[in-house]
Amino acid sequence: MLTAQRQNSMREAILDAAEDLFSKNGFRAVSMREIAQASGANLGSISYHFGSKDGLLRAIYERHSGPMNRRRQELLTEAQRIRDPDDRLEAIVRAFILPSLSQTEGSIGGGARFARLRAVVMAERHEDAQKIIAETFNPINLAFIDALQACLPHLPRADIVWRTHFLLGAVSYTLINPWRVTRLSDGEANGENTEEALVQIVRAAVAAFRAPAGSDPAP
Amino acid sequence: MLTAQRQNSMREAILDAAEDLFSKNGFRAVSMREIAQASGANLGSISYHFGSKDGLLRAIYERHSGPMNRRRQELLTEAQRIRDPDDRLEAIVRAFILPSLSQTEGSIGGGARFARLRAVVMAERHEDAQKIIAETFNPINLAFIDALQACLPHLPRADIVWRTHFLLGAVSYTLINPWRVTRLSDGEANGENTEEALVQIVRAAVAAFRAPAGSDPAP
DNA sequence: CTAGCATTTGTACAGCCGTCCAAATGTGGC
DNA sequence: GCCACATTTGGACGGCTGTACAAATGCTAG
């Protein structure tokens, strides 16, 4: 019991397999038996460790959301130290989405796999998941909105919320349909390349945030 | 047979109910029996009219995609007649997404309901649906990209594809999670108000399209 | 070695799923 | 009235679902 290192190897194998399958095929479409087979575990073991399918999903969220939001808070604090409002805006936007796009699939604190899982599960309108997502992500999202408001004091808060929403939509959509941009550009752009996606999203989002509020523009 | 008006009342009732349920709960989560009950039809009638659940989904797409894309082409042609590139850009963006956001749920040629269905089904990674969507929407999407390229001749085509992709993502995300923006703004913004969403998306997207390409900005 | 707990196994269960089909019913032309 | 066809009905089918549980196994402390 002293070395809590690899004590629950099976439990984590199940979590890994479930996360992989859910992120690829959605929550409802993946059966407990598929997860059992993919993880090498017995069907009953999943019930033993997680109680139910919903419990399994909840465990996946619990494993990730803490470290991920800690990482985002870290990046946000770092970005907020930047003096120049223009540079700061860009840094905040990058901090907002970088943990969701980081390619390191295995890492607990982030990774595109968990982000894709959230996007897919959210689209399925799974009630339990929506509640979990709202509870764990709202506070940090509000912190980012506050930071953005500080960069753009002239902008109504509602506009900032809308544009933050669009930013999340762009990330979500890219994670769900990476091939779309590849096909539409005839291979010139690569949707699966998360670094390229990051650069493109940041540039577009920063410009969107800098758009005028209600009246006509005046550049 | 002369009055082809209400000849297939049951068939259309099934389509309506299925479209409603699919757009609200996703494809896999809705059972044939639910659709039967909601439409007042017998379970066997659905098989009779559409062959299978996939056939039903396909019929929904066939009912909408033609008129919808005709409407989008119409709006695009109209927008392309605008001389001033700045005004034209905005008109094209509006034409691109307006049919997906128009609140008239009943209409065949568009409506948020069908758009939400597409977004949800797409997120479920239903293979049949993805093929249908790609086939029926790629040509018109490429036409829009060409029109945008004409407004922004200095911009690499890959950048335009990326930003068009983000635009679709913002629309999709808003249709899937309308309440998010409402909650995050404490009611100041209303995600369910499609007119407000349209204005906000257009303003943000136009600014994003006008962002510089690769090098540093210079305003 | 053994007692006791943690974990794994195999199986059973009730329920819902999409699909299929024969029979019943409705409908329009002759 | 009657025939032929379109549609609707109700039920049955095999298969898959998530969950539950007793029995078997593994493992660790004493």
Image (cartoon, coloured by chain):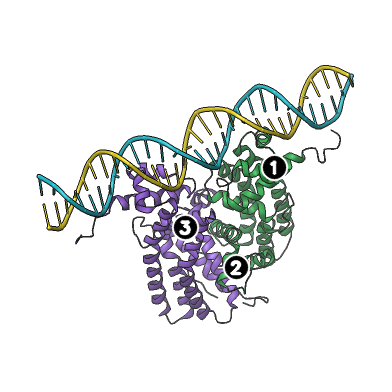
Chain colours: A purple, B green, C cyan, D yellow
The label shown at residue B204 is 2
- Measure how far apart labels 2 and 3 are at the Cα level: 24 Å
Q: Give the residue type at disc 1.
A: Ile
B99 or A116, which lies in front? A116
Q: Give the residue type at disc 3.
A: Arg
What x and y, as percent, mark residue C22? 66, 22
Query: Do callouts 2 and 3 mark residues in contact (Cβ within 8 Å)?
Result: no
Task: Tell me which residue sits at (48%, 77%) in the image.
Answer: A147
What x and y, as percent, mark residue B164? 58, 58
> Is residue A185 left or right of B98 when viewed as pictured?
left
Q: Chain of mark 3?
A: A
Circle 3 or circle 1, nearest the eye: 1
Seen in the picture, residue B147 relative to A85 is either above or below; the reply is above
On the question of residue A30 being in view, the answer is no
The answer to whether tags 3 and 1 share a subunit is no
For disc 1, the marked residue is: B14
> Is residue A146 left or right of A73 when viewed as pictured?
right
